[in-house]
Image (cartoon, grey):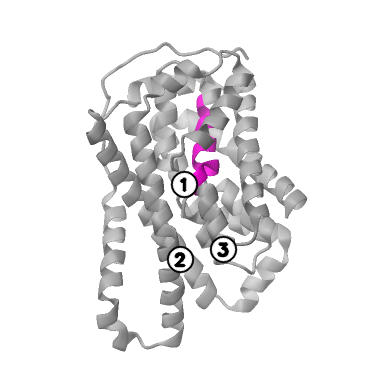
């Protein structure tokens, strides 16, 4: 199928920015309040299992939050300072080369999932080849330096985990981009022309993007840390051992968790590192699938590009990312 590049159009927004969900804001504020007030309630919470749960939960939050904050600040700066039109202009005109360049740009222009979807929409609206914009959307939150650094910190002394995550995620971005180049429906992506718009001046864009991404991603981080802490303290060890002892079942369970939990890529390594019973190939699947397809991302993609696109793109991204994780994990880990 021949690729068509949509015309460069600037249209006013078709609907206002709805901002950060109230639930995400409430979760983040509740966690901050609980952290500050924890000493006051300690005497009433003197239960060993609850103390262990809170220790694991707080440890995960303390480890992951600095990387999450750094990631959303960089994402906000990119949204404010790097015009998508510039990226669209420097991409090669050849489709396959543009896909490779778009994927590699994700390593140089890091951003979390919350920012990569609208940025890719802006790329399409400025005339970038849709397949290249999608490769960027998959690569940016998965293999940028902040994510790789956080993975190295979460898995100390295991550089092979960082290498495996990088290779599997890069392969996912390139393969999905090339498949879309040949068989994708670019008409679905034209919806981006009507939905993507700039927020205003650079400072306003930076503040709004950083605030939105931190509160939204922070809410999902809280959920992920709570699930990991619960698995370590509440779920019977024999249940975890049974699941973790079967590689196929372990991969399926952690892939499903990655889709449901929707944890920001700057923090997901700390959550899955808190599940040491699972084999590394299963934990790699969690790290590779999460930034590519989860509930949050599918919802954002449907909002930006339309439901027709999301229904086609999400299954493709899931199959390719899971296959890449299993193959690279079997090879390196």
Rounded to the nearest angstrom, the CA distance separating label 3 from label 1 is 21 Å
Residue 154 x %, y %: 54, 60
Q: Which residue occupies 45% across, 32% down?
A: 307
* Comparing labels 3 and 1, the label whose residue is closer to the camera: 3
Marker disc for residue 295: 1
Q: Residues within 10 Å of mark 3 (few under 14, many from 20)?
A: some
Q: x, y percentage for residue 195? A: 34, 26
Task: Please report the residue visible at 38 percent of the width from the left and 39 percent of the height from the top.
Answer: 75
Q: Find disc 3 in the rendering and name its residue.
A: 273
Q: Earlier in the sequence, mark 3 or mark 2?
A: 2
Q: CA distance from mark 3 to mark 2?
A: 9 Å
SS at mark 3 in the image: helix
Q: Bounds of the magenta span?
A: 133-146
Which element is circle 2 on? helix
Magenta-drawn stretch, dominant element (helix, strand or loop): helix
- Residue 305 in view: no
Front position among marks 2 and 1:
2
* 106 left or right, relative to 210: right
Residue 313 colored magenta?
no
Question: Which residue is at 54% across, 67% downward?
Answer: 274
The answer to which of 112 and 188 lies nearer the viewer is 112
Point out which mark residue 60 bears: 2
User: Quick one: label 2 or label 1, which is nearer the N terminus?
Assistant: 2
């Amino acid at each position: 199928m021949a690729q068509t590049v949509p015309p460069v159009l600037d249209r006013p927004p078709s609907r206002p920015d709805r901002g950060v969900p109230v639930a995400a804001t409430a979760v983040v504020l509740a966690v901050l309040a609980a952290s500050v007030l924890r000493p006051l309630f300690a005497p009433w919470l003197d239960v060993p299992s609850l103390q262990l749960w809170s220790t694991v939960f707080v440890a995960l939050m303390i480890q992951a939050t600095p990387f999450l904050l750094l990631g959303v600040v960089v994402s906000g700066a990119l949204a404010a300072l790097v015009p998508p039109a510039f990226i669209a202009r420097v991409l090669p005109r050849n489709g396959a080369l543009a896909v490779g360049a778009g994927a590699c740009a994700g390593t140089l222009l890091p951003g979390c999932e919350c920012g990569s979807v609208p940025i890719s929409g802006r790329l399409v609206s400025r005339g970038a080849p849709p397949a290249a914009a999608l490769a960027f959307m998959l690569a940016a939150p998965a293999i940028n330096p902040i994510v790789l650094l956080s993975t190295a910190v979460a898995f100390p002394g295991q550089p092979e985990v960082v290498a495996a995550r990088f290779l599997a995620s890069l392969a996912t971005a390139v393969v999905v981009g090339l498949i879309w180049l040949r068989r994708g429906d670019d008409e679905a992506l034209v919806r981006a022309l009507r939905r993507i718009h700039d927020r205003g001046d650079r400072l306003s864009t930076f503040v709004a993007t950083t605030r939105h991404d931190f509160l939204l991603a922070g809410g999902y981080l809280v959920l992920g840390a709570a699930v990991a802490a619960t698995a370590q303290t509440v779920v019977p060890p024999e249940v975890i051992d049974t699941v973790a002892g079967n590689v196929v079942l372990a991969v399926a369970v952690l892939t499903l968790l990655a889709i449901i939990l929707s944890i920001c890529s700057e923090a997901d390594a700390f959550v899955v590192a808190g599940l040491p019973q699972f084999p590394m190939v299963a934990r790699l699947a969690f790290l590779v699938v999460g930034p590519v397809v989860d509930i949050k991302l599918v919802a954002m993609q449907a909002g930006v590009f339309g439901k027709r696109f999301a229904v086609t793109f999400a299954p493709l991204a899931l199959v390719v990312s899971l296959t890449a994780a299993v193959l690279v994990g079997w090879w390196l880990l």
